[in-house]
Image: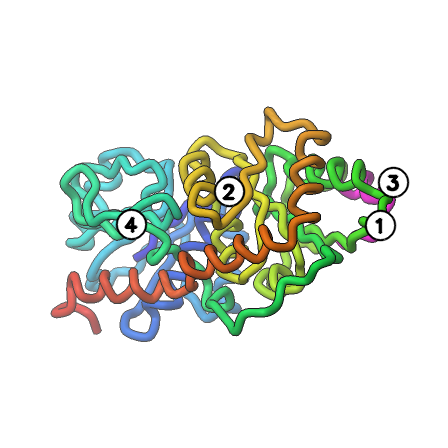
Amino acid sequence: MIRVASRPEVGGGHVSRARALAGALAAKARVTLVLDDQGMHWKAALAAQGLDAVGVGELPVCPWVGCVVDSYDLAAEEFTELRGRTGFLAVIDDFLDPPACADLVVNGALHLAGNSVKGCPALLGPRYALLDPAFRRQASRPVRKAVERVFLTFGARDSRNGVQLALDALALLNGGGFQPEVSIALGRRAPHLAAIRARLLSLPFQSTLLLDAANMADLFRAADLAIVGGGVSLLECIACGTPPIGIIVASNQAAAMMGAAKRGAAVLGGVVDELEPQQLAEIIRHIVADTDRRRTLVSRGCELVDGLGAQRVAEALLAARPQRVV
């Protein structure tokens, strides 16, 4: 069982991680994703991937062999109930504050290492980043001197409107030979979608808006530079070999984003609510002009994130309860 936060307000990062792990587990075990009551809009997309998904009130009766939780919303007694129902509880924990009943903690952030959190066994660091197989490392491609294509994504919901910040910054750089093609990935339920559509009409460069894109790996690989949120999108970008400028859009992203910058795998743009378009424009200007820096970002990133994290986590989960897996 994978209990995943899926209501519209939380965006798509939790579901993205859950579906990657479910896909890796599915070869050896039956997997059911358990969605929030308000998250059933994900069911069709998961079914298209061959994954079983139900609401919280529709749990089938079966001999569960374990539960993975990727949600900030559960109360302590709910974790205890899931542990009692399934016999094993793993928690994908961005805050490194697992419930007392957890048997395993998973956090694939770039700044982490080690094998325990508060005495609980843990899988920590980018080797365990939960990414879809589409993002697995491929043959390296050359970093071009000219930045001709820029990709923007801040998650399906982009509740802090990072896309508009990035568009405004890019607009300030128009001219001087820098006129990139810009692609934007956004969800149909994004609260600022109408404002983004309106902003695209006045941009001085070519832009394409992609809603609920299913080919994110292709979009990253087609870009010479990406401006992304500091969550799952950052890990996907790094795995694809695209140099990223990362923007912190949630408090739980700060340590991971700063860790990625410290390890040379990303450029730290700043905190979305504290960053002015002119400041971001200067950051973009410098990285566009520095081909060697972009090459270094790609090479350091490929050393850290290979896209095999979901497979490693799945193997660890199966090894934890091998006698009951059917």
Expressed as whole percent of the image width and height from the top left, the position of residue 256 reads 42, 41
Q: CA distance from mark 3 to mark 4?
A: 44 Å
Q: Amino acid at mark 1?
A: Gly
Residue 203 inside the magenta-drawn segment: yes
Total labels drawn: 4
**Judging from the image, what secondary structure is the residue with disc 4 in?**
strand
Mark 4 / mark 1, whichever is N-terminal: 4
Q: Which residue is mark 4?
A: 124
Q: Residues within 10 Å of mark 2 (few under 14, many from 20)?
A: many
Q: Name the N-terminal-most of marks 3 and 1.
A: 1
Q: Say which label, 3 or 4, has the lower sequence index.
A: 4
Numbered disc in front, either 3 or 4:
4
Quadrant where the C terminus sits is bottom left
The foreground one among 296 and 63 is 296
Distance from the alpha carbon under mark 1 to that under mark 2: 29 Å
The picture places residue 196, in percent across and down from the top left corner, at 75, 40
- Does residue 1 appear in the picture of this structure? yes
Circle 1 residue: 177
| Mark 1, secondary structure of its residue | loop
Q: Which residues are magenta?
A: 196-208
150 sits left or right of 102 in the view: right
Q: Residue at x 36, y 61 (%)?
A: 309
Query: Which is nearer the N-term, disc 1 or disc 2?
Result: 1
> Tags 4 and 1 in contact by the CB under 8 Å rule?
no
* In-front residue for pair 19/222: 222
SS at circle 3: loop
Residue ID for mark 2: 230
